[in-house]
Image: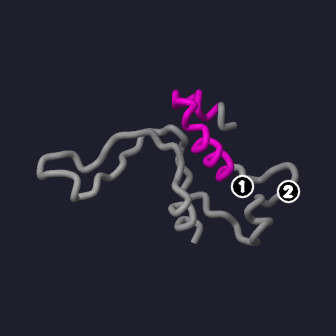
Amino acid sequence: MARCMLYSKGIHKKNWAEAISCATFILNRIPTKVVKHVTPKEKWNGQKPNISNFKVFGCECWAHIPHAKWKKLDPKSHKCKFTGLSFSRVVELMH
């Protein structure tokens, strides 16, 4: 799954860890053959996962540049490709 995510979006293979992390995040929140009619996350903690925060791996996104690092007419964000959420952000989204 991670390999398909990387190559379908043209993202370099050095980002394999982000692809695996994102794939694991997705797989834990969708139903599987092993655990019928519930997701692995729901089976683990008894709560339905919130999937409203799903983003397409490799989609265009904009990263905010902190105010201290730009001047009046400089851009306030930087265009990049989405490769997943940081662990602290995932924890925040889970609550």
Indicate the quadrant where residue 6 lies: top right
* Residue displayed at 28% across by 57% down: 66
Are discs 1 and 2 less than 8 Å apart at CB? no
The residues colored magenta run 4-26
Q: Secondary structure at mark 2?
A: loop
In the rendered structure, the answer to whether residue 72 lies left or right of residue 1 reads: left
- Mark 1 = which residue? 28
Residue 61 sits above or below residue 94 on the image? above
| Residue furthest left as drawn | 72
Q: How many marks?
A: 2
Q: Which residue is mark 2?
A: 35
In depth, the one of 61 and 84 nearer the eye is: 84
**What number is the disc on residue 75?**
none
Q: Residue at x 36, y 49 (%)?
A: 63
The relative height of residue 19 versus residue 11 in the rendered view (above or below) is below
Give left or right: position of 40 versus 67.
Answer: right
Q: Position of residue 88 (x, y in %)?
A: 52, 63
Secondary element at image label 1 = loop
The kind of secondary structure the magenta stretch mainly shows is helix
Does the magenta-highlighted stretch encompass residue 49?
A: no
Residue 33 percent across, percent down from the top left: 86, 49
Callout 2 crowding tier (Cα within 10 Å): few <14, some 14–19, many ≥20: few
Of the 4 image quadrants, the one containing the N terminus is top right
Which amino acid type is shown beneath numbered disc 1?
Answer: Asn
Q: Position of residue 17 (x, y in %)?
A: 61, 43
Q: Residue furthest front?
A: 14
Q: Residue at x 12, y 47 (%)?
A: 73
**Amino acid identity at mark 2:** Val
Q: Is residue 45 left or right of residue 18?
A: right
